[in-house]
Amino acid sequence: MPRRWLRFPLTATDQARADPATITVLDGGPAHPDRLRLEFDVTNPAAGPPAVRPLFPGVLSFLADPGAPGVLPAATDPFTWTDAEYAGWRTVGTLVMELDPTLVPALGVRPAPTVAWYWPVRLSRDFLLDSVRHQLVKSKVRRPAGGEVATGDPRWPAHAVSGLLAGTHAVKLRTPAAEDQDDAVRFAMPTVELAADGSTGLWIAVAAGTSTDDGVVPAPVPGTVPLLDPAHPANALLDARRTLISLRSQTIGAEAGVGPLVSTALPDGAWPAGPRWFTVAFSTPGAAGFAYRSGALPAVGVEVTTAAGIVLQQRRLSTRGLITVMQEPTDPAAPPPVVRCTVDPGADLRLAETNGARPGPPETIEFDFATLTEPARVVLQPPPPPVLDAAGKAAYATRLATLSLRLGRTPATREAVGERLTTDESLIRPVAWPAGTPVFRGTRRPWAGAADPANQNVLVDGPGLADLRALFDALQQLTPAPGRPPIRPAEAMVLWLMEGRVALGSEGFFNIPMLAPGANTSWIFADRTGFSGNPFDAAVFGAATEAQTRTLLRSMLLWNCWGMDVFAATDKLPGQDTTLRWEPTIAASAAGHDTKFRTALAAIAAAGFTVPTEAQVNGTIELRPMIGGGWEFRLNAGYVRTHLQIQYGEYLRRQVAYLDPARTAPHPALPAAAWSLPAFNYIAFNGGLAEAGRLWAVADGVLAGGAAPPWVRSHQDALRTFRLTADEQQRTPLAAPETRSRAARVNGLHFAALVDAFGAAYPRVLYP
């Protein structure tokens, strides 16, 4: 049996002291529905107050109640360690418990509670004078004015107790090797507050974490709410009762038969024997299904009512963005509820998307959980500028970039990326391959910086603010014609990373750091060896004109940095490994590529998307002659923006039918149903429309076969249902971990996983 270390707040012995007729379980009402309160009378109050056992091992802090009697002793006070001195201290307040992070995986629940609060509790005389002073693990105490007090310092006990009462020091509870070795049972702990008549009550709150997860501490709520307080917006609160019920089987003191306190507070049974919960997920600005600690959500107010108008909740969102509604069991069992959420998004956000109904008022969404077939969601997003002038576009790009950057760097995003990639790999990995062998691999990992040493699929760093600002600026220039696919920043971002920026950084092409705004202040020698397949010697190559050299640089960079292959009006064909097609002379080579470039720009424009002109693109590549012949080049600040616009324009072009200027027949396109499926869009870009069409037909067969798993709801899901074919295995080298697969389905699923996971930090569409 696995070792247990979770504990119910009261031991079985203290639970037996509770009068069953007085046990009451409450929540925090409309303003604080996530909280749980236990109320009961102790049958033998003369025996003293029941001790409180912390929920889990880790770090224990205290937040004194400012209204409680007593004083907070200073570390410089002449501590006497007497009962009379203790009686004068302010010892009533809130106990804050932070789980040892190494134990989070062992909980086995998502989201995992990592912080818990109990209040009101009293730091007992034995806890302060014995447990803290002598028995629990000692650690250095930080002085308020700076410096530290070592554990061997004679004044350490005074500093430790003073700091704990003031909320500036914490004590550690070790993970026990056995249940009877737990610090929470070996040593004296805090107690509940017990009235003279034996009545008592304990509030409980739990959270999935705080803003320290992403290094950003949101501003406190109005007043003086400290970060340790569960009311602080940085704390991602979870429904306490639901969380404790999910952990009951692992919790000491919550076993079946212990007594009525546990069975009343934590009913042991699924609906209709126990309560059930329904969740509405608010997120900003990314895709539904992922909630992030952005610091923006606590400014959003939500009122939740029944369809009849009875107020269930009236609150601010937590940073996790989850609204949970509990339904108590009834006899006969009631149907799932219908709830209405009225949203006050504040000045910085607007309602962009929901899968609920809109019964009337513009900010009210109705969810009928009896008919809803997917998780309830509400997506909020910064509104676009009312007038799309240059200044407005720049401001909008900066706003979206700032928010996306913060969300993209949270642990929640990194976890989502790693989990999605690992899950998809397990679905398509050949049975004969060793377990854990990566399928999505290669030097072009779609993130910047180093990968997590423990999991190469996990994002450690992400694009910078300037990169994101350039992305949103470029996307606003595309202005698609009516009826065209919407601009989806997540797909554009991941396309850029997979095809260009990281590929460039890892392959070292001309050693150009392809970072926005694209300006490379160092001049770089346009060495002939940098041009794949160049048949001309250095003298001939160095004698090329400025215009010819610029054309060849532009073409080579489009392939190496943007994945544009031949970049002609015709689709890419499997096995085309280079852009440049060399003619007998440099002049003819450059002229051929100029023709292809103009044709390609015309095709994107004919498909209904605005692209930069040839002159604008050429103007981003600066050249100067070198002494002795040849040219040096650098890229100016407009380079990344114009090429992002071209790259994503080409990506969108393949999705729609249009009259190609180089043809008399309409250009083939993906089915309109594929527009929202990033795997197929990327396959069309990376492997060509013919391959995308072939795989669409394969997915048709999976969906029509009737044997697909229940989670398969789309053609994209269907691509995840079968393992690599023999041909795909040949294109996905098992023995070359840095060689990217050349199998279109593998790359399409890789792209889709990143769009759905890492890309969830970006707005779903550019203009909601």
Image (cartoon, helix red, strand yellow):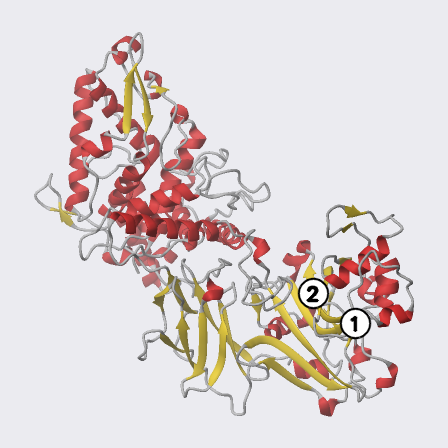
Q: Quadrant of the N terminus?
A: bottom right
In the structure shown, which secondary structural element does the residue marked by tag 2 occupy? strand
Could you tell whether 731 is left or right of 94 in the image? left
| Residue 66 position by quadrant | bottom right
The x and y percentages for residue 67 are 70, 74
Identified at 30% across, 20% down, the residue is 533
Amino acid type assigned to the residue bearing label 1 in the image: Gly
Q: Nearer the viewer, residue 223 or 58?
A: 223
Amino acid type assigned to the residue bearing label 2 in the image: Val
Q: Nearer the viewer, residue 692 or 25?
A: 25
Residue 696 in sight in this render: yes
The x and y percentages for residue 721 are 42, 55
Determine which of the numbered discs, if any, sits on residue 96 in the image: 2
In the structure shown, which secondary structural element does the residue marked by tag 1 occupy? loop
Q: If you read the primary sequence from the N terminus, does the residue marked by circle 2 or circle 1 appear first?
A: 1
Measured Cα–Cα span from mark 2 to mark 1: 20 Å
Closer to the camera: disc 2 or disc 1?
A: 1
Could you tell whether 477 is left or right of 602 in the image? right
**Pointer 2: residues within 10 angstroms few (<14), some, or many (20+)?**
many
Residue tagged by mark 1? 70
| Residue 495 position by quadrant | top left
